[in-house]
Image (spheres, rainbow, N blue to C red):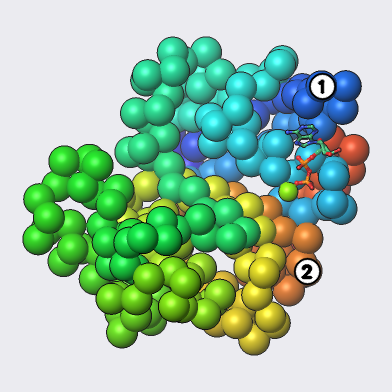
Amino acid sequence: MSDKGGETVPLLAARDLVKAHGRTEALRGASVELRDGELLAVTGASGSGKSTLLHCLAGIVRPDAGSVTYAGQRLDELPEKRLSELRRTEFGVVFQFGQLIPELTALDNVALPLLLAGAARTEAQGEAGEWLERFGVRGQGELRPGEMSGGQAQRVALARALVTAPRIVFADEPTGALDSLTTEQVMTALVRTVREAGTAVVLVTHDDQVAAYADREIRLTDGAVAAQGVAA
Ligand SMILES: Nc1ncnc2c1ncn2[C@@H]1O[C@H](COP(=O)(O)OP(=O)(O)O)[C@@H](O)[C@H]1O
Ligand SMILES: [Mg+2]
């Protein structure tokens, strides 16, 4: 939490988000707050609007109505250039299938965001190696995504999302393609790493095993928040 005039404000706050895809109303007045360093799970049935909410919160998609405020700035009103700059420096994103670049090694995939931000190659690779180490996949650094297991690839994707030291990581079903044991290993590595770095996380999942790692859970039903509370 940050302190503003004696009043605590959330790091990220969305109010009354509405978003339609064609004639489908994916979000119908969803509101959510994320505190600094908090691990928030967003759960709900398939089609309940979880991914759309995550995309709006991360500034990937603009809502049709409602507001998204990050550290005092209205993301939904920022010009595209400033929004993409902010996304690149303050946010990290992971999807169900890591979406690593198939031609690059694990090390180069993780180094890429640093290179894009202007880092020198040796520095970027050094930093990337440390993040692979934190996720227990340093030994896979020279492998390309097609040569890794699903769990290894997701650890590399998480390392890539965290390498720029973002304030928030947005993860959409990051363990959705993994078995239960691998899910546990990946989640343990994620939680340890974000706690160390103080990173806040929005974790979309339909898996109770995954939601149990969160500080708090909100559940979406038909594009609105149906329930919230402390994760079991
Ligand atoms: N690009 C799209 N085009 C059309 N409909 C979409 C699109 N993305 C999502 N939807 C629809 O919006 C609703 C919410 O989708 P989504 O946010 O992906 O939910 P969830 O992630 O919970 O499964 C669903 O009915 C889905 O079919
Ligand atoms: Mg989804």
Label 2 secondary element: helix
Task: Please tell me how crowded label 1 is: few (under 14), some (14-19), or many (20+) other residues with Cα within 10 Å.
Answer: few
Under circle 1, the secondary element is loop
Relative vertical location of residue 87 with respect to residue 142 in this rendering, above or below: above
- Frontmost residue, 73 versus 26: 26
Disc 1 target residue: 22
Residue type for callout 1: Gly
User: Mark 2 — residue?
Assistant: 208
State the image coordinates of residue 78 (x, y, percent, origin top left).
Answer: 46, 15
Note whether ligand 1 is within 8 Å of mark 1: yes
Give me the residue at 42% from left, 24% from top. 83
**Callouts 2 and 1 close, C-beta under 8 Å:** no
Q: Quadrant of residue 197?
A: bottom left
Which image quadrant is residue 221 in?
top right
Against 148, residue 20 (above or below) is above
Q: Residue 93: x, y in percent?
A: 49, 48
Which tag, 2 or 1, sits closer to the chain's start?
Answer: 1
In the image: residue 84, left or right of residue 74: left
Label 2 Cα neighbours within 10 Å, binned few <14 / some 14-19 / many ≥20: few
> Residue 110's image quarter?
bottom left
Q: Which of the two marks, 2 or 1, is nearer to us in this view?
A: 1
Separation of marks 2 and 1 at Cα, in angstroms? 31 Å
Left-right relation of 49 to 104: right
Q: Residue at x 56, y 18 (%)?
A: 76
